[in-house]
Image: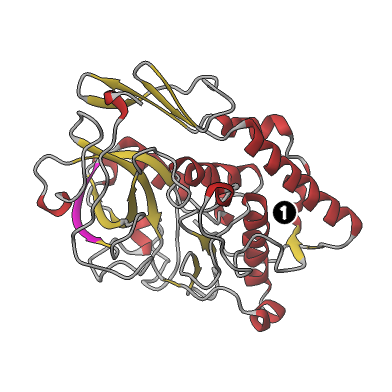
């Protein structure tokens, strides 16, 4: 890449949180405020994914608090953001911000894979069942902000480029409970959602790490996969081989009927939408998100043409996902993967 698209290395510096730990105890909007539902209590779970995605894409927010994980090549910030949009003023929540690497696509820090994981789930899950929190590509304006002075600007711009993802509240990092799966159908459905998603993307991060989160709300036991950079064949080029604790193969033998129906209808042309996940243009000293076009190069995940930067999945990666979709569909048809009817009276999970 030429000087227009060079990104200095992130060095880390604010102290400190454990890898993927919960955000510090800073003030956040309550579930009732976030989901605009006065019936929700402080400990209830809510996630208005489409709304949060729009808020993050708009950039109408300010960073009010910041902490950073321990040092490492993929160190990331946990931030508290407060919305400045007049229609949602004073709403605040936590996000994770992982600065993009120099080459924009390392084996353990791949913005395009994280974007792909979020978008892929939309093909077979309803918003109330998403397993990946809202995830966008964002360039944080630095502007003499002491909280973010360890971030480096992207090229000649005054902002730091990276992946920004909503960080759920009221969650724990222990998700796999076989005994609960037997007695709790809602939990079993969400665990099945996570299992199928992990197989589809070839999740290579270890189950023992806090990359998987479970809502503590007993009525809404949502389960999430966070930080999905180690997926979609990332391990092909990685120097480290993870153990069998990676969630690359099926771990449960059931799937909710609602997901099975949608999964059967996923076709190759649906997956082609993942070939372009983000497109940016450098205009003077600013990075602007522009309307996505056709892939500049289907064989590369990071593409550049002039001042335009494009991220997406390669044709080969899309073929791998398509084969995983086919394999899951065959498992359903053969009876190897049991399809369970959806539980009655399921709470609306905003």
Q: Is residue 14 left or right of residue 194?
A: left
Q: Residue at x 28, y 24 (%)?
A: 4
Q: Quadrant of the N terminus?
A: top left
Q: Foreground: 148 or 238?
A: 238
Q: Position of residue 67 (x, y in %)?
A: 23, 62
Residue 236 drawn above or below residue 6: below
Judged from this view, the residue extending furthest toward the bottom is 179
Q: Depth check: give the residue in front, 133 or 96.
A: 96
Say if the magenta span includes residue 103.
Answer: no
59 w.r.t. 124: above or below? above
Q: Which residues are magenta?
A: 61-67
**Residue underneath mark 1:** 258
Task: Name which residue lies at 20% across and 28% down.
Answer: 156
Q: Secondary structure at mark 1?
A: helix
Q: Is residue 27 left or right of residue 143?
A: right
Q: Position of residue 132 (x, y in %)?
A: 51, 54
* Residue 64 is inside the magenta segment: yes
Q: Residue at x 34, y 43 (%)?
A: 162
């Amino acid at each position: 890449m030429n000087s227009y698209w060079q990104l200095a290395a992130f060095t880390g510096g604010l102290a400190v949180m454990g890898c993927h730990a919960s955000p510090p105890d800073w003030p956040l909007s309550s579930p009732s405020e976030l989901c605009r539902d006065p019936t929700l209590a402080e400990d209830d779970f809510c996630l208005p994914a489409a709304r949060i995605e729009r808020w993050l894409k708009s950039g109408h927010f300010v960073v009010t608090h910041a902490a950073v994980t321990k040092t490492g090549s993929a160190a990331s910030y946990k931030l508290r953001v407060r919305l400045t949009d007049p229609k949602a003023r004073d709403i605040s929540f936590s996000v994770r911000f992982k600065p993009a690497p120099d080459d924009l696509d390392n084996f353990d820090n791949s913005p395009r894979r994280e974007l792909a994981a979020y978008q892929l789930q939309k093909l077979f899950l309803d918003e109330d069942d998403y397993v990946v929190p809202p995830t966008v590509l964002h360039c944080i304006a630095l502007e003499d902000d002491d909280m973010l002075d360890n971030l480096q600007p992207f090229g000649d711009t005054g902002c730091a480029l990276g992946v920004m993802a909503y960080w759920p509240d009221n969650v724990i990092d222990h998700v796999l409970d076989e005994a609960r799966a037997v007695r709790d159908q809602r939990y079993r459905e969400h665990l099945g959602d996570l299992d199928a998603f992990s197989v589809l993307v070839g999740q290579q991060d270890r189950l023992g790490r806090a990359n998987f989160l479970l809502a503590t709300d007993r009525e809404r036991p949502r389960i999430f996969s966070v930080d999905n950079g180690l997926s979609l064949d990332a391990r092909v080029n990685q120097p480290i081989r993870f153990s069998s604790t990676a969630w690359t193969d099926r771990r449960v033998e059931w799937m909710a009927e609602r997901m099975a129906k949608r999964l059967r209808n996923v076709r190759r042309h649906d997956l082609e939408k993942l070939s372009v996940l983000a497109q940016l243009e450098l205009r003077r000293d600013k990075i602007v998100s522009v309307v996505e076009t056709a892939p500049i190069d289907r064989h590369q995940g990071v593409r550049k043409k002039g001042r335009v930067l494009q991220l997406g999945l390669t044709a080969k990666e899309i073929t791998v996902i398509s084969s995983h979709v086919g394999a899951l569909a065959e498992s359903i048809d053969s009876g190897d993967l049991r399809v369970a009817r959806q539980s009655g009276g399921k709470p609306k999970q905003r």
